[in-house]
């Protein structure tokens, strides 16, 4: 690995992303890590166990990302989350619609990838429509609305939107306060403590996000690209340091497959991570003989999944991430926008479940 030729770093970045995502896919399959399921258990049964697993992942990611920052391995301010442009309306609308979409689509972006790996054809359709809607929101007709309407409602914060910058309180203090409070809540439950899978799912997911920051922000970091003479992060679609997020990568994966012969296209960190989740989940499903084909129940089921995928694609791009991208990766930077998105994903999902329950009754 050398900064003299950044291209030599690409295999390490995409290989690291794939390996970490493979682990997440396998463990997510085994432990039933599902953010939509976490909300469903909470709203419909009053069971917070899977929600605690998600919160454990957030706490681990916060502590791990902070450790990398303090050790000088990464600079979290160089990711997309703590930027000074605080597009609060995009976070609110995008997060809410993503929450609605993941409920209609039977799972968020990461769960969609995990289910594709188990042979779920419904999730494959969600993947396609999510990717199309995400690309339309990035560069197409929906992008005009995103930029011209939602992102115009913003506040510029000179110091950045992460909690340490906003308050002047050191990152370590905030990390200990937030992560500590989450850990106390998580392990206050005897039911949670009694299940190894709950801890395994939360711990591994959080560590995978931390590993993602290290791979992208340290292994793939080039202080001065010899061609541009500027700082660069190798093999990322955003050109910034990235960890795991699964909305825009689905769009870029479809783009890569459709324009395969275009030599300017390359496998990026995000594309490799999405493929890794599918591969890891499939490996676990095949090893445990739980792989099975599953299709739609009826036309309404099909419509719900299509609409859910499109809402996740649009909402995830507007909010700058999904339940993993903003809910864990972004949250680990202590960005205010990530916290707001996390809250509105929960609201959107919970209200949709309440509506479905009312309609069914």
Image: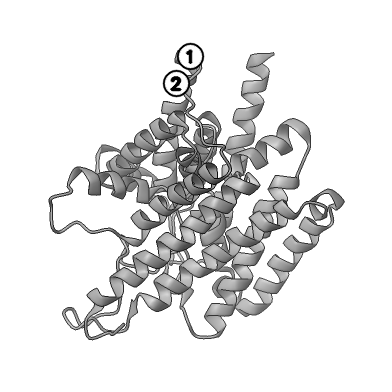
Give the residue drawn at x 41%, y 56%: 273
Which residue sits at x=39%, y=45%?
150
Identify the secondary structure beneath mark 2.
helix
Quick one: SS at disc 1?
loop
Q: Is residue 114 above or below residue 106?
A: below
Mark on residue 345?
Answer: none
Occupied quadrant, residue 183: bottom right
Question: How far apart, in angstroms, are the residues tagged by discs 2 and 1?
Answer: 6 Å
Mark 1 residue crowding within 10 angstroms, few (<14) / some (14–19) / many (20+): few
Q: Is residue 197 above or below residue 178?
A: above
Instruction: Give the residue number, with chain letter if any, for mark 2.
Output: 302
Q: Quadrant of residue 10?
A: bottom left
Which mark, by number, is residue 298?
1
Query: Are the two marked residues, 2 and 1, in contact with CB atoms closer than 8 angstroms?
Result: yes
Q: Is residue 136 above or below residue 57?
A: above
> Which residue is at a point 46% across and 41% down the rendered structure image?
117
Q: Position of residue 312 (x, y in %)?
A: 45, 39
């Amino acid at each position: 690995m050398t900064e003299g030729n950044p291209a030599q770093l690409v295999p390490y970045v995409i290989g690291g992303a794939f390996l970490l995502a493979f682990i997440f896919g396998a463990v997510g399959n085994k432990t039933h890590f599902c953010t939509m399921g976490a909300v469903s258990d909470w709203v419909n049964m009053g069971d917070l166990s899977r929600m605690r697993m998600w919160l454990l992942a957030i706490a681990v990611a916060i502590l791990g990302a902070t450790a990398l920052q303090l050790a000088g391995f990464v600079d979290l301010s160089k990711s997309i989350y703590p930027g000074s442009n605080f597009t609060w309306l995009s976070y609110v609308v995008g997060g809410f619609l993503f929450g609605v979409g993941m409920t209609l689509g039977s799972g968020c972006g990461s769960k969609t990838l995990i289910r594709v790996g188990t042979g779920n054809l419904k999730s494959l359709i969600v993947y396609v429509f999510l990717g199309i809607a995400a690309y339309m929101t990035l560069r197409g007709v929906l992008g005009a609305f995103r930029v011209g309407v939602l992102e115009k409602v913003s506040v510029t914060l000179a110091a950045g939107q992460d909690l340490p910058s906003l308050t002047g309180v050191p990152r370590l203090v905030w990390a200990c306060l937030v992560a500590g409070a989450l850990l106390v809540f998580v392990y206050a439950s005897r039911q949670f403590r009694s299940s190894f899978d709950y801890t395994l799912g939360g711990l591994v997911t959080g560590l995978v996000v931390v590993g993602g920051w290290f791979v992208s922000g340290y292994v793939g970091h080039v202080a001065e690209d010899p061609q541009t003479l500027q700082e660069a992060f190798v093999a990322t679609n955003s050109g910034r340091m990235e960890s795991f997020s699964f909305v825009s990568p689905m769009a870029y994966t479809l783009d890569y497959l459709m324009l395969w012969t275009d030599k300017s296209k390359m496998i990026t960190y995000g594309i490799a991570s999405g493929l890794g989740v599918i591969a890891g989940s499939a490996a676990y499903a095949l090893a445990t003989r739980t792989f099975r084909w599953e299709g739609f129940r009826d036309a309404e089921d099909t419509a719900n999944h299509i609409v859910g995928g499109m809402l996740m694609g649009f909402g995830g791009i507007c909010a700058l991430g999904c339940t993993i991208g903003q809910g864990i990766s972004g949250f680990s930077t202590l960005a205010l926008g990530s916290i707001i998105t996390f809250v509105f994903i929960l609201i959107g999902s919970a209200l949709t479940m309440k509506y479905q329950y009312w309609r069914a009754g």
